Amino acid sequence: MRDAVKSGIGVCLGLALTLLPALVLAEHSAGMGSMKMGASAPSFDRNEARAVSGEVLGQSVAGVTLTDRTGQRVSLSMFEGRPLVISLIFTSCYHICPTTTQHLDKVVKKAREALGDDAFSVVTVGFDTLRDTPPMMDEFARRQGIDDPDWLFLSGDRKSIDELTASLGFLFEPAGGGFNHLIQTSVIDQEGRVYQQVFGMTYDAPYLIEPLKRLVFKTSAAAGLISNLSNQVRLFCTVYDPTTDRYKFDYSLYIGTFIGFMCVLVLGVTLVREWRRTLRSRGGV
């Protein structure tokens, strides 16, 4: 009985070893055939996607017009004058895009605490033109619990989405019923130009808030001396506290810097006076 079992196992192994190369070859041939027929999409090159997103810094997005949740047309040029944060998602995504949006909501709340409620605007854009309709964007916003009045959820037709994604350097491709793409949040300056890209589903708050802070407190040539000085103080003294994961306005930094400057000034004046006194005592002056 034992010999029969061994003999049967040997036959099975022999058949497997004989058929395996043929099966592998058949599978490989089938794969090559699918590629020739165009059924398999090329793999998404994340390095290329990140490089492209970096190449568009300084490029304008102001000319793009999209549609809000109520069906009203919205031109991105309407946000000029304030910084704008743009996040791209697709509503049929059930994990990554919702998590990204919920994290963005947390960071936006911290940014508003530090910079002011009306310091900047936010838009989330659905780039799946077949499914991301105004009602779907409305439902997506409600599911994420977004209640920020200065945060719009927008969608668009193929032309407008292609124009926007090209301006933002955002690459994506269909994959398995969804899309392959980088998780990218773009910071747009007051002139409607791409200022900085932030990558990742979650990230430390300063990655987004620091560029916003620089834009919000940017010195304007048209502003007065007092206004510019105030912005410079706010820029310098609005600092991130990692222990609380919050931004705070810390006067001590400004006061410490001022005291240090005054000490250096007094020391400089004292040295000059001593130098002049020495010259007088030697008859040099």
Image: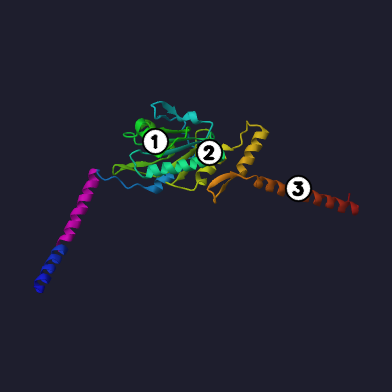
Q: Residue at x 22, y 43 (%)?
A: 37
Q: Residue at x 68, y 48 (%)?
A: 256
* Earlier sequence position, callout 3 versus callout 2: 2
- Which numbered tag is attached to residue 265? 3
Residue 129: quadrant of the picture: top left
Q: Secondary structure at mark 1?
A: helix
- Above or below residue 262? Residue 62 is above
Please report contact status of discs 3 and 2: CB closer than 8 Å, yes or no: no
Q: Amino acid at mark 3?
A: Leu
Residue 124, x across and y down, in percent? 42, 36
Q: Secondary structure at mark 2?
A: helix
Label 3, label 2: how far apart the Cα atoms are: 38 Å
Residue 144, x across and y down, in percent? 40, 39
Q: Verify whether residue 95 appears in magenta.
A: no
**Which residue position holds label 2?**
112
Q: Nearer the viewer, residue 255 or 54?
A: 255
| Callout 1 crowding tier (Cα within 10 Å): few <14, some 14–19, many ≥20 | few
Side (left or right) of 173 relative to 191: left
**Which residue position holds label 1?**
142
Q: Amino acid at mark 1?
A: Arg
Label 2, label 1: how far apart the Cα atoms are: 21 Å
Side (left or right) of 279 relative to 266: right
* Earlier sequence position, callout 2 versus callout 1: 2
Side (left or right) of 4 relative to 273: left
- Above or below residue 240? Residue 121 is above
